[in-house]
Structures are given as C-alpha cells and as structure tokens.
Image (spheres, helix red, strand yellow):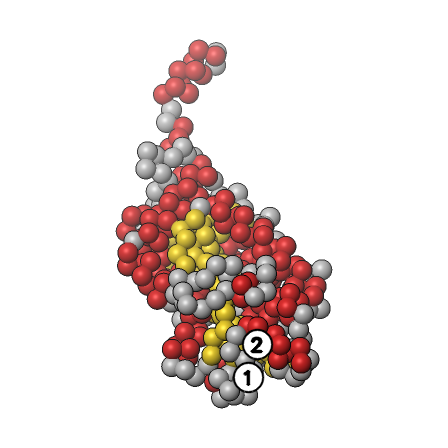
Amino acid sequence: MNRRSLARILTATPILSTLPSFVRPAAADGWRPERPVRFVVGFAAGGSTDTTARLVANAIAAPLGQPVVVENRVGAGGNVGSENVARSAPDGYSYVVASVGTHATNQFLYPDMPFHVVRDFTPVSLILVSGTVLVVRPTLEARSVTELIALAKKNPGKLNLGTGGSGSSQHFAGALFENRAGVSFTHIPYRGGAPAMADLVAGRVDVIFSPLAEAMGFIRSGQIRALGTSRLERMPATPDLPAIAETVPGYEFNSWIGVFGPAGLPAPIVDRISAEIAKAVRTEDTRKRMQELGYIPVGGGAQEMADVQKKDLALMEELARLTGLYSG
C-alpha cells in the first residue's frame, strides 16, 4: 500500500469513535458520562462524609445525565473505600468522597499502606470545610479558653480529654491545643465521638474537641459549654463564639470533605465533575443544608483541594509524631 492510499484511508476513518470516551477531546460543555457514576464513601451510612456525599450526588446527577450512586465500603478508618477507588480505572466513573482523616492523617497512622494519598489519586473538588468546637462539661470551672488554660496549668494532667479514638481528628485537635497552649490533658479514647460526647454530657469527661455538627444540639440545650472554635476566623454558624486563635495565636485545626478520582484522571473529566460540584454547592438549598450542619460550603476546584491536602499532610505528620502514633 502506498502512502497516498494510506492517507485516504486514515482521512476517511472515524478514529475518535474507536477511542475510549475518557481520552476523547472534550465536547463544548465538557465530558459526558455514559453510565452511572460511583461516589465511594469509606464510612457507614448516616455519618458526615456519607451525608455530604449523598447531598452532592443527588445535586449533580441531573446535569450529568446519569445517576450518581453512593457506595459505602467501610473499614480501616476509610482506607477500604479509598483503596477501591485508587485501584479503579481513571475513566470518570469512580470517585472517593474523602476527609482530612482518609487523605491526610491515615497516611501516617497505618503501616504498609496499600496506596499513597497523593500519588494514587487525582484531586477533583473541595466540597466544604469545617472546624471543631472546644466544649467542656457545664460544671467545669472554666468559661473561656483563657480560664481553661489556667485551670489546666494549675492541674497538669488532671483534666480528661475525650476523643473518638487515638489518631482521630478529635485527638489531633486536642493534641495540637496542648502543644500550642502549653497544657497537658489525660487522653481518654472512645470508640467513636458519640460515646465520648455522652460522657461529656454526663460529666464524666472534662474536655472534647468536637465537630460542630455533632455538638450544636448539646450546646443549644445547655448540656455542654462551648469555649471556642478551631478555625482562624469565627465560624458563620457560631458568630458569637471566639476562635481559639484569639487566645492561642496561630492555633488552627480544620476538617474538610472533598472528592478525589484515581491517579491519571484526564483533565476534561476533572473539570466537568468539579464544575458540577461547584454549581451544586452554590445552590441555595445545598448551601443552607450544609450550613445547618455546621459546615462552610466551598465548592473549590482541583487545585484548591490539592493545596489544602498538602498543607494538612504536613500538619498531620507533625501531630502523628507528637502523639507517638507515627507509623513511618
């Protein structure tokens, strides 16, 4: 066959139709899925990550033109779900709805991790951020962060810090406070945040750094006392509650929920999914629901998610070493 004949054949052949959809050039309105999309959550249904995943999945299904199915794969602190997505094809149909725990903290807590939270994933979207709230039993003789620090320094190790478990965000938020404020608590790890909160309400625990969503009802009912929040600025849901940083300069501990795909996810797919999540988060209903849960809606893009993850990886490594939990 001469070159002219070959050129005529190539010109007439619809080459693009033979390529997988995820490597074709993006259409004018971006990549379009041709079958249902999976949002994998590494935690049980009903928790904050699962609730957020379902809220976003429902909102983006219609514009994508395909169902977005939330799939709970529970185990190993969220690692089971993360590994499932890390091993999935980068074709736009599998994502993990991740947290600071799964995609920052766990990297330093689990030996022989079967994946790396940066190398094996593609950042897609930062859905929301949140802070923790420093709460104490109502009978504790401390009505401010300043008074709590003074009480703790007067009684080193005598105040109990309840957490959802060693290495949990509650544990690390408390450990960071101890380090930055120069105090010492006795750590009481529970099997989850709910039993820790129950003991705080009952007066058997002195201090907890709790997700705002989990503490809000108890704060409003007067069953526990809130002293401060862990973001640098005051949180919209609690504008009258000071930031801990107003007393302990530089103290900051944030939680977040975001979306990651497998490594090698093509840019047109990342752009489309990120754009639809951003649109969803900007809708009044979605924003209102997130704010009611104590979250700050973001809807940030892939680079914003990558930047936040990089910052928190450095902090979580520091805290894993500080608490003696570093597995590296």
Q: Is residue 5 above or below residue 303?
A: above
How far apart are the two marked residues, 1 and 2, measured between alpha carbons? 8 Å
Mark 2, Cα crowd under 10 Å, few <14 / some 14-19 / many 20+, is few
Q: Is residue 19 above or below residue 11?
A: below
Evaluate whether residue 127 shows in this view.
Answer: yes
Viewer-closest of 182 and 117: 182
Q: Are marks 1 and 2 in contact (CB under 8 Å)?
A: yes
Residue topped by disc 1: 141
Residue 186's quadrant in the figure? bottom right
Mark 1 falls on what kind of element?
loop
Residue topped by disc 2: 147
Viewer-closest of 285 and 270: 285
Residue at left offset 67%, top offset 70%:
182
Residue 156's quadrant in the figure? bottom right
* Image location of residue 6, percent across then percent down: 45, 16
Residue at left offset 55%, top offset 57%:
103
Q: Amino acid at mark 1?
A: Glu
